[in-house]
Image (tube, rainbow, N blue to C red):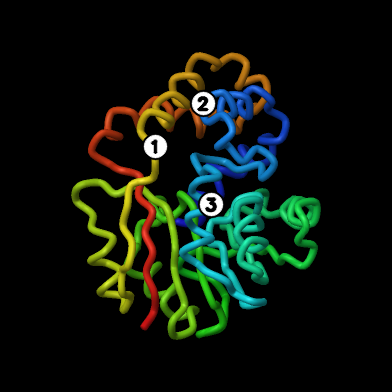
Amino acid sequence: MSSETAERRYADFYRYQASSPTLRQIYVDVYGDDYPDELQPFGFVTRTDLSRIATLVGPLDGGLLVDVGCGRGGPGTSVALTCGARLLGLDVVPAAVEGAPALAASLGLPTAEFRTGSFTGTGVPSGAADAVMSIDALWMVWNKPAALTEIHRILRPGGRFVFTTWEPSYLDHARLLAKAGFEVSVREETPDWLDRQGAVYARVLAATETLERELGPGAEVIFAEARDTPAVLGGTPRLLIAAHKP
């Protein structure tokens, strides 16, 4: 998916996300205490995921953590606080990052920076990032080799790239990472992802009328996902992958 397509599809959603208590409650009901509600995430990230990502990123002692596809910035802020990092959040959707500084400040990271940027055009100087993270965003990028080349470019030697995504049978992220110059250390399915994701989609479709009122034109993107995705989930695992630049 191009950055222009992603911006068009998700702009309305991010404008109205905070106005939908129903969508928030769906995730709270499905994930329980594992749902990081205070971070205002969009998607399937959990406290378990964030703890694992922070462990794999490791202590950064003031180093730069870049969160690509950061959304409203909450998950990246959480990892940056745990790792002691400076945070730069990038998203192709301007409406996503508009409120991110205020959210980061409310979570205890007033120095976080957020701006528009993409996997293939981060605008970050070469070797400037001590670590890069991304949650449930890489799957939308059509040119994954170019995206991984860009992440490799902005990382310092020894820097880590930790991300979650879905991997269909025709795609091998480990092979793509190796071609981009990375060494892969972790490739694992995230806990309970399939049942939880399916439950969220079922509840979204059951609450169509309410979500339409709360999200307005932003509702269609989640309705389309809830309708179309369940048929392919069984063969498309949600993975957490960690790699480093030698």
| Foreground pick, 184 / 170 | 184
* Disc ID at residue 193: 1
> If you read the primary sequence from the N terminus, does the residue marked by circle 3 or circle 2 appear first?
2
- Are the two marked residues, 1 and 2, in contact with CB atoms closer than 8 angstroms? no
The answer to whether 106 appears left or right of 170 in the picture is right
Q: Which residue is drawn at 49% across and 58% down?
A: 53
Q: Which residue is drawn at 39% across and 41% down?
A: 191
Residue 106 vs 235, above or below: the answer is below
Residue 55 location (% of width, % of height)? 50, 62
What is the spatial separation of the Cα atoms under label 3 and label 2, in whole angstroms?
A: 17 Å
| Foreground pick, 120 / 186 | 186
Q: Mark 2 points at which residue?
A: 30
**Element carrying mark 1:** helix
Q: Mark 3 points at which residue?
A: 50
Which residue type carries mark 1?
Trp
> If you read the primary sequence from the N terminus, does the residue marked by circle 3 or circle 1 appear first?
3
**Element carrying mark 3:** helix
**Element carrying mark 2:** helix
| Foreground pick, 163 / 42 | 163
Which residue type carries mark 3?
Leu
> If you read the primary sequence from the N terminus, does the residue marked by circle 1 or circle 2 appear first?
2
Q: Which residue is drawn at 61% across and 37% down?
A: 13
Does residue 1 appear in the picture of this structure? no
- Badge 1 crowding class, 10 Å Cα cut-off, few under 14, some 14 to 19, many 20 or more, is some
- The quadrant in which residue 70 appears is bottom right
Does residue 225 appear in the picture of this structure? yes
What is the spatial separation of the Cα atoms under label 1 and label 2, in whole angstroms?
A: 11 Å
Residue 239 vs 114, above or below: the answer is above
What is the spatial separation of the Cα atoms under label 3 and label 1, in whole angstroms?
A: 14 Å
- Badge 3 crowding class, 10 Å Cα cut-off, few under 14, some 14 to 19, many 20 or more, is some
- Badge 2 crowding class, 10 Å Cα cut-off, few under 14, some 14 to 19, many 20 or more, is some
